[in-house]
């Protein structure tokens, strides 16, 4: 009695800052309990205990009261979502999305109040309510189709525009909710906060026109397209009152739109670039091709592909992987660069994949042909200047391929094998064309910048005689290449200083002192092309005499480049933060930005 007499019925005590903040930021999403504003609503109406005992009846009472103020709508959204979490009922998830939509958009005051924390929470209730409310039972698949979906207080009719589901010659047919995925293997998980449920769309081929065929030729069929679904509810307050709602399904691929217009305002869409990228690489066959395409070299492995349809006005950045590697190794760099707002709508990333044991000159000729073909196909009239400001980024052997795209070789590679002029060599037209493409290189006029990453311009010290013998025993070169080579030798027995089994692998080509490496070192980079070097070295101190474990600094160094960045890293430096930051800096410089 004496102790209680010392404290007034109403007063204050000093609390812990973190405990106080946890109370202020608590919500159904973070703690499984109502937020402070929702709890205040329940307290004010005397419904705290009733919601615990009979949540469904309490929610219906709140809805049917008729006075759908902002406070009541927010409480309905959160309490309905909380009830859905406890019962795992899709109808309640979708109802939470309806209430959140009404709270956000039926009153412009809420969405325009940037300091109201309920706006962000309501957006999350809407986004999660859509993805969970439209998911197949026991699955991450979200059903986006014209359908009638039940709600606890009625139903909603959903309808969409079929044109929204066509993308790059494909029909988007299956949608996976990626907003709740945890990511592994990537340093940062990027998400653009906004409105809408982020999904990854799987595709099937659709259409037979030339545009659709050309798009499918460049875009892999296993692509996972990052998209956001937004449901625009019509007369939402009236629909909540009478239990009959209509909602229009709108689908926004991330490469086409990052905002949505609502009542004359532009709102950001919720985008999950990282989750969609990781989902696309989960169990993807590309990982199995790294050594497979090295051991069994085939020309059909060579391919230039894109991750989305061609966008005029965006500068192509072509990423070329190294030996026994694949485009998947660019994932960390892609995650960083595609999430940079200054790059996202200014560049488009393309990838070149190839059999990395093939002779480097052959792989380079295939890259050259692929680049020429895509430029001619996409812009035959030359109306897109961005397409002719192409940037090539090559790692290791990929850097050698990139260098050959901006090199004037003259007759150096040919003179390394014969003194006989090419015009005098006998062979079929097909054989002569193969040799012409593989031995003679001229700068591509639409490539204006190259970036070399850990590139062995003077060969790799790791390529010993034992390594070359071992690789030759394992690698199977293309049969047609070997046959054509041997046929030309037989037709010109005294012209070519080669043996019948002297078709080199890429590993042979990268031996220091090999005739290919000598010829490349003597071939200048074309005037007007800007070149950059990113060189990896291990250890500290001066870089002279150091290596990255595969390539020595002296081999990767080039005189006359616009910049040289040394990264303390091993040869596989693609994921190193300093390497990625340097590539980002170079691309911003290319776009004229500081």
Image (spheres, rainbow, N blue to C red):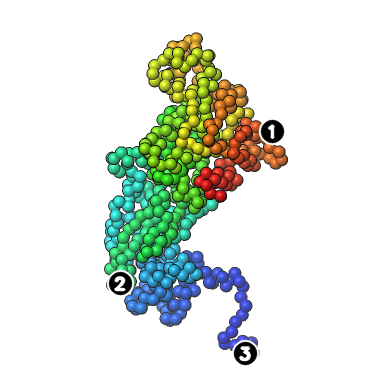
* Residue 261 horizontal/vertical position (percent): 38, 61
Q: Tell me the distance, in whole angstroms, between the alpha carbons under discs 3 and 2.
A: 54 Å
Which residue lies under the disc numbered 1? 545
Q: Is residue 150 above or below residue 346?
A: below
Quarter assignment of residue 6 = bottom right
Q: Hey, which residue is sitting farthest right in the picture?
A: 541
Pick whichever of labels 3 and 1 is earlier in the sequence: 3
Quarter assignment of residue 4 = bottom right
Residue at image coords 34%, 57%: 250
Which numbered disc, 3 or 1, marks the residue closer to the eye?
A: 1
Q: Is residue 408 above or below residue 339?
A: above
Is any atom of residue 476 visible in this view? no
Q: Tell me the distance, in whole angstroms, between the alpha carbons under discs 2 and 1.
A: 76 Å
Pick whichever of labels 2 and 1 is earlier in the sequence: 2
Q: Which mark is residue 342?
A: none
Residue at image coords 46%, 51%: 273
Name the quadrant of the N terminus.
bottom right
Which residue lies under the disc numbered 3? 5
* Residue 323 horizontal/vertical position (percent): 53, 33
Is any atom of residue 320 visible in this view? yes
Categorize mark 2 by other alpha carbons within 10 Å: few (<14), some (14-19), many (20+). Answer: few
Which residue lies under the disc numbered 2? 238
Pick whichever of labels 3 and 2 is earlier in the sequence: 3
* Residue 270 horizontal/vertical position (percent): 43, 58
């Amino acid at each position: 009695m004496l102790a209680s007499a010392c404290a007034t019925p109403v007063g204050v005590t000093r609390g812990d800052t973190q405990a106080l903040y946890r109370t202020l930021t608590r919500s159904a999403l973070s703690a499984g309990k109502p937020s402070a504003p929702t709890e205040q609503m329940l307290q004010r109406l005397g419904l705290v205990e009733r919601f615990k005992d009979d949540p469904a009846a309490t929610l219906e009472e709140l809805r049917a009261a008729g006075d759908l103020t902002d406070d009541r709508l927010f409480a309905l959204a959160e309490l309905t979502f909380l009830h859905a979490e406890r019962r795992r009922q899709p109808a309640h998830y979708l109802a939470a999305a309806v209430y959140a939509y009404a709270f956000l958009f039926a009153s412009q005051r809420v969405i325009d109040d940037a300091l109201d924390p309920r706006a962000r929470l309501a957006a999350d209730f809407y986004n999660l309510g859509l993805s969970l409310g439209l998911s197949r039972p026991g699955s991450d698949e979200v059903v986006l189709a014209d359908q009638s979906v039940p709600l606890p207080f009625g139903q909603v009719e959903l309808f969409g525009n079929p044109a929204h589901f066509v993308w790059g010659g494909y029909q988007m047919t299956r949608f996976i909710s990626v907003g709740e995925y945890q990511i592994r293997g990537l340093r940062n998980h990027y998400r653009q906060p906004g409105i809408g449920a982020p999904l990854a769309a799987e595709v099937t081929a659709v259409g037979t026109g030339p545009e659709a065929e050309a798009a499918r030729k460049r875009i892999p069929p296993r692509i996972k397209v990052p998209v956001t679904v937004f449901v625009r509810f019509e007369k939402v307050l009236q629909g909540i009152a009478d239990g009959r709602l209509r909602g229009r399904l709108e689908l926004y691929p991330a490469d086409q739109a990052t905002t949505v217009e609502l009542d004359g305002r532009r709102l950001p869409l919720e985008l999950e670039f990282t989750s969609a990228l990781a989902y696309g690489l989960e169990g993807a066959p590309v990982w199995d091709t790294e050594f497979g395409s090295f051991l069994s070299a085939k020309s059909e492995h060579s391919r230039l592909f894109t991750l989305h349809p061609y966008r005029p006005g965006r500068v192509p950045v072509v990423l070329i992987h190294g030996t026994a590697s694949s485009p998947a190794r660019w994932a960390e760099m892609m995650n960083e660069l595609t999430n940079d707002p200054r790059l996202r709508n200014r560049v488009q990333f393309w990838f070149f994949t190839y059999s990395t044991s093939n002779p480097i000159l052959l792989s380079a000729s295939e890259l050259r042909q692929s680049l020429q073909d895509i430029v001619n196909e996409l812009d035959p009239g030359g109306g897109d200047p961005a397409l002719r400001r192409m940037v090539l980024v090559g790692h290791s052997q990929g850097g050698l391929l990139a260098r050959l795209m901006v090199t004037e070789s003259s007759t150096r590679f040919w003179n390394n094998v014969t003194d006989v002029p090419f015009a005098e060599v006998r062979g079929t037209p097909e054989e002569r064309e193969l040799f012409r493409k593989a031995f003679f290189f001229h700068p591509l006029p639409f490539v204006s910048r190259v970036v070399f990453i850990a590139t062995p311009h003077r060969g790799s010290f790791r390529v010993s005689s034992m390594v070359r013998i071992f690789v030759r025993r394992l690698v199977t070169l293309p049969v047609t290449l070997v046959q054509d080579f041997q046929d030309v030798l037989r037709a010109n027995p005294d012209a070519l200083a080669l043996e019948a089994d002297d078709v080199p692998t890429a590993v042979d080509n990268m031996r220091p002192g090999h005739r290919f490496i000598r010829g490349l070192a003597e071939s200048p980079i074309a005037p007007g092309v800007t070149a950059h070097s990113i060189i990896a070295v291990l250890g500290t101190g001066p870089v002279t005499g150091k290596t990255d474990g595969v390539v020595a600094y002296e081999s990767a160094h080039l005189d006359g480049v616009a910049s040289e960045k040394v990264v303390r890293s091993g040869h596989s430096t693609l994921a190193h933060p300093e390497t990625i930051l340097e590539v980002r800096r170079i691309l911003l410089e290319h776009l004229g930005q500081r």
